[in-house]
Amino acid sequence: MKIIVGLGNPEKKYEGTRHNVGFATLDRLAETYQIAVDTKKFQGLIGKGVIGGEKVILVKPLTYMNLSGNCVREVAEYFRVEAEDILVIFDDISLVPGQIRIRPKGSAGGHNGIKSIIANLGSQEFPRIKCGVGEKPKGSDLADWVLGHFNNEDKRLVDEAMDRAVKAVECILTEGVDAAMNRYN
C-alpha cells in the first residue's frame, strides 16, 4: 500500500493558487482513477483506490500547509506505512511553471509543508513530485507570491505539468522512482 499526498490549503479562497498545486494534482489523479477523496479522517480528506495495480490512499491534509505533517503522520501510523511508501506532490518556486521534478528523497528546500512532514515522520526518505510555480519577483513577499493566482500562460503550463505528474505517479507505482525520474524530469 502507498500513500499519495497532495499539499495545499483547504479554504475555497486558496483554490487555484500556486501553493495549492499539490491539491489540484491530487484532484486530477483522483478523477483520472475514479477515487473519491471525500472521507474526513486523520485531519484530512482521504480516498482509497487502486492505481497501476497498487492499493493507494490519496490524502489532502486539511491542517493548512505548515502543519501538513500532522495529517500525514496520522495516516501513515494508522495504515502502518513507512516514509519511503509515501509520495508527496507539492509546489516548488525554484522550478519554472510547467516543469516537474521527481526526487526519491531530500531536504525540505525551504518548503514549510515538507518541513512539517519531515519533522512528523522523522525522515526525509520519501519520494516527491515537485511542480514548478515560478520564482517570486524581486521585492515581492513570498507568502503573497505562493498564495497568488497564475496568469493565463502560467496556468496553461501548470495544467500540462499536472497531467504529466499524474502519469508520473502511475510510473512511480508500477516501475519505480528511478524510471519516473528518467522519463519525466
Image (cartoon, rainbow, N blue to C red):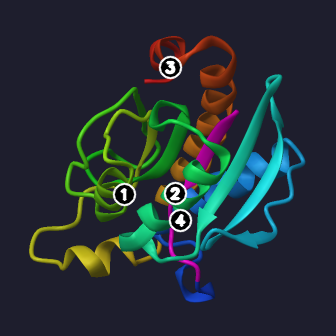
Mark 1 Cα shell of 10 Å, populated few (<14), some (14-19), many (≥20):
some
Residue to which mark 1 is pinned: 120
Q: How dense is the environment of label 4, judged by Cα within 10 Å: few (below 14), some, or many (20 and up)?
A: many
Residue bounds of the magenta highlight: 1-10
Distance Cα–Cα, label 4 vs label 2: 4 Å
SS type, badge 3: helix
Find numbered disc 1 in the image and state the secondary structure of the residue it sits on: helix
Going from N to C along the chain, the mark reached first, 3 or 1, is 1
Residue in front for this viewpoint, 72 or 147: 72
Q: Amino acid at mark 1?
A: Asn
Regarding residue 18, the answer to whether it shows in the image is: no
**For mark 2, what is the residue?**
72
Q: Which residue is mark 3?
A: 177
Mark 4 touches mark 2? (CB < 8 Å): yes
The answer to whether residue 80 shows anywhere in this view is yes
Q: Residue at x 47, y 77 (%)?
A: 64
Q: Nearer the viewer, residue 171 or 83?
A: 83
Disc marking residue 71: 4
Assign the C terminus to one quadrant of the image. Answer: top left
Badge 2 or badge 1: first in the primary sequence: 2
Q: Is residue 23 above or below residue 41?
A: above
Q: Secondary structure at mark 4?
A: helix
| Residue 123 in the image, given as x and y percentages of width and height | 32, 41
